Image (tube, coloured by chain):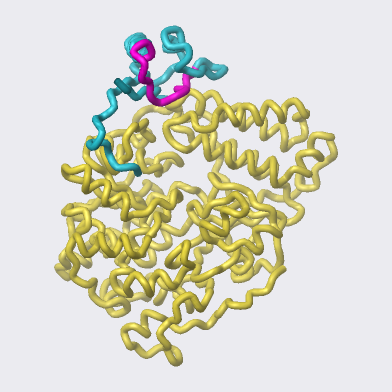
């Protein structure tokens, strides 16, 4: 276990400092790059999540009291802000929002703007927590992107789900109408609650009246979406950051991160932690170990699943000292993805957890592409055999070859993500693989399931078309 | 002339007919689903083969598109 030399827990509230509010103690202007912190909703160090929890946050009035009015900005002003801030997408890909917006503008025509709050990743909670706790930051940011694109309508897309924050967003929209804010028209869209339906081309297709399945595209969405219109799909957390950048300025905002990953970052901690599903906001050079300590994990676990079910495993000790930034994670072959940090405790079996996740992901295929339909169930079966100790050495070679075949063969990244998870499993749990092959009983077999994986749908995406509408 | 070739995996059903017409241009997996080897073809012979493969695909999955003239290409994203 490492120590946290520069983790400053009781950081002054930078927003309050900016607005000259009285806070709990002196409020110095934040020193760029100085403090690292891990903060939950309303805890010191939080930026997006600063302020009282939802319900006690005062709605729109509370939001305006905390952040002030959104500065009046024209399209060029917002675009300059996007460029200088270096705001990267927080939905998983990390694509700079400035480039999506510039591409859509160069493509001409009338762009379509979609804020993606669907958060398909079953274990992730960051987007729905953000929308439920800070709906006005998301809507402020969306209004700014609309100005940058020169459009007067924004679609906020969610999944139809009992956990959806749609009612909170609808209430926030009503509050803004009542206050007559200079907003674009809001359209709240609710699509099928399927894993691949949150993928950007599936979202673009759905809001345009098509099926919520990923599309095969030869051109980027920002050049031509399903309707032919340039389509910008941006994650809810991404646009919320823009609302903060507009108020604090890009430099102050960027100083909450590290140079290669500017700004704060929302993560969801799940698995063997004190509160699975807890959302935390990271500032500065925070390691995965720092995050886990903040959530009551005292020492390095066996392994950490980084970036989501579609992410990859990292060995526990390595993960513990790795900064949760794009650059830091690259060093352990991982990516921030949707910001998921999944804790596999000592005594649990990574091969068993992987088999459950792969079976779930196989069932969440949209059932369109051949290698996904044919390949994923076979990959899932091989992972299950490996987990139960019935796979032999030749079977592992076949599994590796099948993964190579499936990789990069689909219209979207779904099969590639499954392959990435399997490859990281074989690398990180190499010793366990050898143990399972030699038929030794697995100690983890009696361990209760660590991750809350939804039940796999064994119909493999070949559903009634209505399910995707 | 340079043409871009693509296989739309969402409509490809693994008939593998494209590979009959354009064997060097398509890799088949064990189920007959095709993967394009190189995304652009230039020689008149290959362009002809690619067009035949596109015409022969029963699902219209094999797509041939003339590359946009230099200068009007979309910016790299």
Residue drawn at the location 32% of the way across and 35% of the way down: A219
Classify residue A431 by image quadrant: top right
Asked if A111 appears above or below A97 in the picture, the reply is above
| Residue A259 drawn at (x, y percent) | 46, 66
Answer yes or no: is residue A367 visible.
Answer: yes
Residue drawn at the location 55% of the way across and 47% of the way down: A311
Q: Chain A's shade in the image?
A: yellow
Number of callouts: 0
Quadrant where the C terminus of chain A sits is top left
Asked if A392 appears above or below B34 in the picture, the reply is below
| Residue A325 drawn at (x, y percent) | 52, 60
Asked if A329 appears above or below A194 in the picture, the reply is below
Q: Is residue A197 left or right of residue A9?
A: left
Does the magenta segment cover residue A285? no
Quadrant where the N terminus of chain A sits is bottom right
The stretch in magenta equals: B33-46
Q: Chain B's shade in the image?
A: cyan
């Amino acid at each position: 276990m490492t120590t946290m030399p520069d983790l400053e827990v009781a950081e002054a509230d930078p927003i309050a400092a900016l607005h000259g509010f009285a806070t709990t103690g002196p409020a110095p202007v934040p020193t760029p790059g100085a403090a690292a912190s891990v903060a939950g909703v309303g805890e010191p160090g939080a930026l997006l999540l600063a302020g009282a929890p939802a319900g006690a946050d005062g709605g729109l009035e509370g939001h305006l009291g905390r952040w002030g009015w959104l500065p009046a900005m024209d399209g060029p002003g917002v675009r300059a802000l996007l460029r200088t801030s270096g705001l990267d997408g927080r939905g998983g890909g990390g694509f700079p929002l400035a480039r999506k917006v510039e591409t859509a503008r160069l493509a001409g025509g009338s762009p379509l703007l979609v804020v993606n709050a669907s958060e398909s990743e079953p274990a992730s909670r960051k987007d729905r927590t953000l929308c439920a706790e800070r709906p006005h930051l998301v809507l402020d940011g969306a209004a700014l992107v609309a100005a940058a694109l020169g459009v007067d309508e924004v679609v906020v897309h969610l999944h139809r789900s009992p956990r959806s924050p749609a009612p909170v967003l609808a209430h926030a929209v009503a509050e803004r109408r009542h206050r007559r804010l200079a907003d674009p028209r809001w359209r709240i869209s609710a699509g099928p609650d399927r894993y691949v339906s949150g993928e950007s081309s599936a979202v673009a297709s759905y809001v345009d009246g098509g099926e919520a399945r990923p599309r095969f595209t030869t051109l980027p969405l920002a050049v031509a979406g399903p309707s032919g219109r340039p389509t910008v799909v941006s994650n809810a957390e991404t646009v919320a950051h823009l609302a903060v950048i507009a108020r604090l300025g890009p430099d102050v905002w960027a100083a909450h991160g590290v140079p290669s990953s500017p700004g704060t970052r929302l993560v969801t901690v799940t698995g063997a932690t004190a509160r699975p599903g807890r959302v935390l906001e990271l500032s500065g050079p925070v390691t995965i170990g720092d995050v886990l300590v903040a959530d009551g994990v005292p020492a390095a676990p066996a392994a950490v699943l980084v970036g989501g079910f579609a992410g990859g495993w990292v060995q526990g000790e390595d993960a513990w000292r790795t900064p949760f930034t794009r650059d830091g994670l690259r060093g352990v072959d991982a990516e921030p993805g949707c910001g998921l940090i999944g804790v596999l405790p000592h005594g649990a079996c990574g091969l068993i957890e992987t088999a459950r996740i792969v079976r779930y992901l196989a069932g969440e295929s949209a059932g369109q592409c051949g290698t996904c339909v044919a390949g994923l169930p076979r990959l899932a079966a091989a992972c299950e055999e490996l987990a139960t100790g019935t796979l032999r050495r030749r079977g592992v070679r076949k599994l590796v070859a099948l993964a190579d075949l499936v990789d990069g063969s689909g219209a979207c990244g779904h099969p590639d993500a499954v392959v990435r998870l399997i490859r990281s499993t074989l690398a990180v749990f190499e010793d366990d693989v050898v143990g399972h092959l030699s038929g030794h009983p697995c100690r983890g077999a009696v361990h209760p399931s660590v991750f809350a994986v939804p039940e796999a749908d064994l119909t493999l995406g070949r559903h009634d078309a209505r399910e995707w509408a | 002339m340079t043409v871009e070739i693509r296989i739309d995996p969402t409509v490809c059903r693994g008939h593998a007919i494209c590979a009959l017409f354009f064997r060097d241009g398509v890799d088949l997996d064990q189920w007959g689903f095709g993967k394009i080897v190189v995304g652009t073809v230039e020689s008149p012979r290959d362009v002809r083969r690619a067009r035949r493969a596109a015409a022969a695909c029963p699902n219209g999955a094999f797509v041939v598109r003339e590359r946009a003239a230099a200068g009007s290409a979309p910016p790299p994203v």
